[in-house]
Amino acid sequence: MTRAFVFPGQGSQAVGMGKALSEAFPAAKEVFQEVDDALGQNLSKMMFEGPMEDLTLTENTQPALMAASVAVMRVLQSEGGFEIADKAKFIAGHSLGEYSALAAAGALDLADTARLLKLRGQAMQTAVPAGEGAMAALLGLELEPALEAAAEAAQGDVLSLIHI
């Protein structure tokens, strides 16, 4: 049987994520503690208790989602008695999920990944401050209707659109 693991990107965060896992499994609790230590902040408390406004800041969301993802993998490994590298043919992630995949596979150290994602999140947050800008996916539209929709959404202020 071929197995693949795919990790989520930003937008799948929720207050309470990882809490039950941390309470039930020492392997998960260790992941959250290591991330907290690496960042010098109690990110796990924010994940478990909120507030949502703080958790959804990109600089917090990115390391939080990675921590939750790696915690799940560590529990699967400790409770299932297997190594992900031996059981999975593919490990991937959507956007920031690629960092979760790298950490889960052992290609990046967990603490380094947490610090990298904190910096990545801060850079993204600085580039587009909270409350400014938006993103949307247009599926199945031809180029002209997509350009019209983008122009209407931006009220005629479309700087560029990349068509692949």
Image (tube, helix red, strand yellow):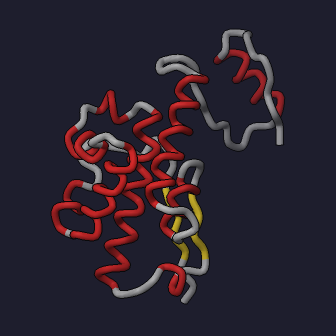
Look at 67% across and 37% down and name the residue there.
138
The foreground one among 27 and 36 is 36
Q: Nearer the viewer, residue 147 or 52?
A: 52
Q: Is residue 70 above or below residue 133?
A: below
Residue 107's spot in the image, x, y percent? 58, 68
| Between 156 and 63, the one nearer to me in the picture | 63
Q: Is residue 137 left or right of residue 69?
A: right
Q: Name the residue rendered at 28%, 56% in the picture.
A: 33
Residue at 52% of width from left, 86% of height from top? Answer: 86
Q: Exactly how many numbered labels are in the figure?
A: 0
Q: Which quadrant is the C terminus positioned in? A: top right
Decide: is 52 above or below 159: below
Name the residue located 55 percent from the left edge and 62 percent from the top edge: 108
Q: Nearer the viewer, residue 89 or 158?
A: 89
Residue 71 quadrant:
bottom left
Horizontal relation, residue 79 to residue 66: left or right: left
Residue 128 shown left or right of residue 67 in the figure: right
- Image position of 1 with respect to 43: above or below: below
Indicate the quadrant containing the N terminus: top left, top right, bottom left or bottom right.
bottom right
The percent coordinates of residue 139 (x first, y second) are 67, 42
As drawn, 57 above or below 4: above
Give x and y (percent) for residue 76. Answer: 35, 76
| 129 relative to 164 in the view: left or right | left
Where does the image place residue 66, in percent across and percent down from the top left? 44, 53
